[in-house]
Amino acid sequence: MASELGISVRTLHYYRTIDQSPWIDGRHYKRRTPADKSPWIWNAELTLKAWEVAKGGAA
């Protein structure tokens, strides 16, 4: 997902965890399983739209 957004993985994780995150857990991303080490599953379409809005662009 980071490459689709044009940002680093570290930046993606940062924006995912902040209070003003453009992404909502359960809507834009979720874990494959409840385990802490489980990979994230992203809804690419919703995530890209939310990122454009957060950057100040029109979605």
Image: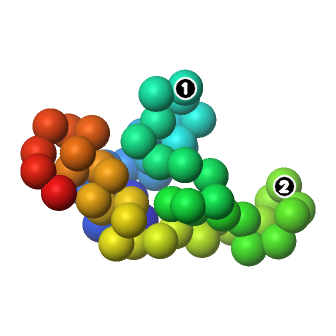
Q: Residue at x 46, y 27 (%)?
A: 20
Q: In which quadrant of the rendered image does the N terminus lie? A: bottom left
Mark 1 secondary-structure assignment: loop
Is 20 situated above or below 48? above
What residue does disc 1 label?
19
Is 6 situated above or below 16? below
Q: Gap between marks 2 and 1, in whole Å?
A: 20 Å
Q: Residue at x 55, y 26 (%)?
A: 19
Q: Classify 10 Å Cα crowding around label 2: few (below 14), some (14-19), many (20 and above).
A: few
Q: Is residue 26 visible?
A: yes
Q: Residue at x 84, y 55 (%)?
A: 36
Relative to 13, 34 lies left or right: right
Q: Earlier in the sequence, mark 2 or mark 1?
A: 1
Residue 40 image label: none
Q: How many numbered discs?
A: 2
* Residue farthest along the right direction in this orientation: 35
Provide residue 34's location: percent of width, then percent of height.
Answer: 86, 64
Relative to 24, 38 lies left or right: right
Q: Is 4 or 8 nearer to us in this picture?
A: 4
| Colour option used | rainbow
The three-letter code of the residue at mark 1 reads: Asp
Provide residue 47's location: percent of width, then percent of height.
Answer: 39, 60
Mark 2 secondary-structure assignment: loop
What residue does disc 2 label?
36
Provide residue 10's location: percent of width, then percent of height.
Answer: 48, 43
Q: In which quadrant of the rendered image does the C terminus lie? A: bottom left
* Residue farthest along the left direction in this orientation: 58
Relative to 58, 14 lies left or right: right
Q: Is 16 or 20 nearer to us in this picture?
A: 20
Q: Nearer the viewer, mark 2 or mark 1?
A: 1
Pointer 2 with pointer 1, Cβ within 8 A = no
The three-letter code of the residue at mark 2 reads: Asp
